[in-house]
Image (tube, helix red, strand yellow):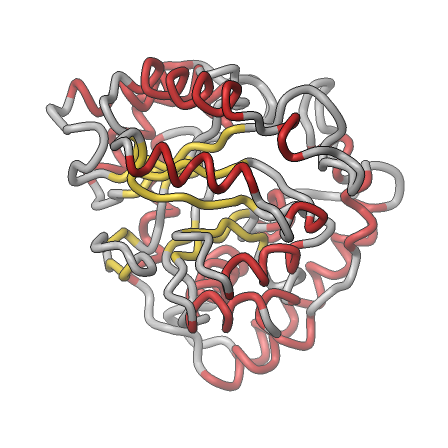
């Protein structure tokens, strides 16, 4: 496992992190705790030292499993050798927040303090490594009171670092916050299809020493190559909505085009869709870690192996840039 600097913090994080959404419940299909615990242990055995979770992943269930595993391994939670990043959702209302929403209501001081205590309890920790706001609106950039509250919590020793997970439809809404020094970390969608962050977002993060967590590196599974035209996502699986209507058909056509590019320009060491998709995201120098979901032992072993691979050759990397796909409207549901 290779490690990278995490922004302006002193942390060296594994370039493959553990994405813990799926282990929180059944949002990705049926999941049992036994598989989840085995996957967590295996990933840590293979060198992963960065875990990303959220309070909304099973209403804290994902956090509880992480706390259980780290306790079993004798790992200190909070400023230990394994870094755990969690996310606080806004209080009840539209997701993502509307431009007219009041930050002081959606992320009030009382609410944020309660939610920090929630994660401390679920994880069994005395301090949280990284707290991210789970979504945002650029309407709050002029007066980001929620970030001021998190700064107070940081001074009080409750949290060590502050971040935001980008709203899918407007990822560049965090650009000004990075420029103005509000954030220690950002979480962003970046993959072979979603390349817009490479234009401005990622360079800004690097320039301002902001740690970058890449999510959706496999485009919710399409870039694993496991889907087919008649694929059925069961009731409750969020991908049923993500790939609704003709979206899956359109996506699979795009995936086939990517495969052709890999066949033409790939090399023997990195020549399959899964490994190329992972290495594509890691090729950008601003990226600190990518967090694929790991639901079982096999996925943990496969995902961790991407760190052992060499960078993509320049010809393939350049050719993959032609597969950028502007489809932000999808995220409206």
Residue 28 in sight here:
yes
Q: Quadrant of the C terminus?
A: top right
Residue 79 lies, in percent from the top left, at 19, 37
Residue closest to the eye, 321 or 189: 189
Q: Residue at x 77, y 63 (%)?
A: 326
Q: Residue furthest left?
A: 74
In the rendered structure, the answer to whether residue 218 lies left or right of residue 67 reads right
In the rendered structure, the answer to whether residue 147 lies left or right of residue 174 reads left
Please state if 78 lies on the left or on the right of 97 as rendered: left
Give how far across and how far down residue 3 sits, in percent.
Answer: 24, 58
The percent position of residue 285, horizontal first and vertical second, equals: 40, 72
Q: Which residue: 71% across, 53% down?
A: 170
Task: Give the answer, above or below, for where 54 lies relative to 184.
Answer: above
The residue at 43%/56% (across/down) is: 212
Residue 230 visible in the shown view:
no
Q: Give x and y (percent) for residue 175.
A: 58, 62
Q: What residue sits 44% from the left and 29% below the top? A: 295
Quadrant assignment for the N terminus: bottom left
Snapshot quadrant of residue 199: bottom right
The extreme right residue here reads 245
The answer to whether residue 230 is above or below residue 77 is below
Out of 37 and 203, give the one closest to the viewer: 203
Q: Is residue 321 left or right of residue 215?
A: right
The quarter of the displayed image where residue 95 is located: top right
Q: Nearer the viewer, residue 215 or 199?
A: 199
């Amino acid at each position: 496992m290779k490690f990278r600097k995490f922004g302006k913090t002193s942390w060296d994080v594994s370039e493959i992190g553990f994405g813990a959404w799926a282990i929180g419940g059944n949002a990705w299909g049926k999941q049992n705790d036994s598989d989840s615990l085995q996957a967590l242990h295996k990933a840590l055995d293979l060198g992963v030292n960065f875990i990303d979770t959220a309070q909304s992943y099973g209403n804290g269930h994902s956090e509880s499993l992480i706390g259980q595993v780290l306790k079993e391994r004798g790992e200190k939670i909070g400023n230990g050798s394994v870094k755990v990043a969690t996310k606080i959702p806004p209080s009840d209302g539209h997701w993502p927040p509307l431009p007219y929403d009041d930050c002081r209501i959606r992320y009030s001081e009382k609410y944020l303090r309660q939610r920090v205590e929630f994660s401390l309890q679920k994880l069994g920790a005395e301090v949280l490594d990284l707290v991210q706001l789970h979504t945002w609106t650029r309407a709050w950039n002029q007066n980001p009171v929620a970030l001021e509250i998190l700064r107070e919590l940081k001074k009080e020793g409750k949290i060590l670092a502050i971040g935001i997970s980008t709203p899918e439809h407007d990822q560049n809404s965090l650009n000004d916050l990075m420029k103005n020094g509000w954030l220690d970390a950002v979480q962003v969608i970046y993959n072979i299809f979603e390349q817009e962050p490479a234009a401005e977002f990622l360079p800004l993060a690097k320039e301002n020493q902001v740690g970058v967590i890449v999510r959706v590196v496999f485009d919710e599974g399409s870039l694993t190559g496991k889907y087919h035209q008649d694929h059925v996502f069961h009731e409750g699986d969020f991908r049923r909505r993500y790939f609704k209507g003709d979206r899956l058909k359109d996506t699979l056509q795009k995936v086939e085009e990517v495969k052709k590019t890999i066949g033409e320009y790939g090399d023997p060491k990195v020549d399959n869709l899964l490994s190329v998709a992972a290495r594509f995201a890691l090729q950008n120098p601003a990226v600190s870690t990518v967090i694929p979901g790991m639901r079982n032992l096999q996925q943990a072993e496969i995902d961790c192996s991407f760190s052992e691979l060499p960078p993509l050759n320049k010809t393939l990397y350049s050719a993959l840039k032609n597969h950028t796909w502007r489809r932000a409207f999808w995220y409206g549901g």
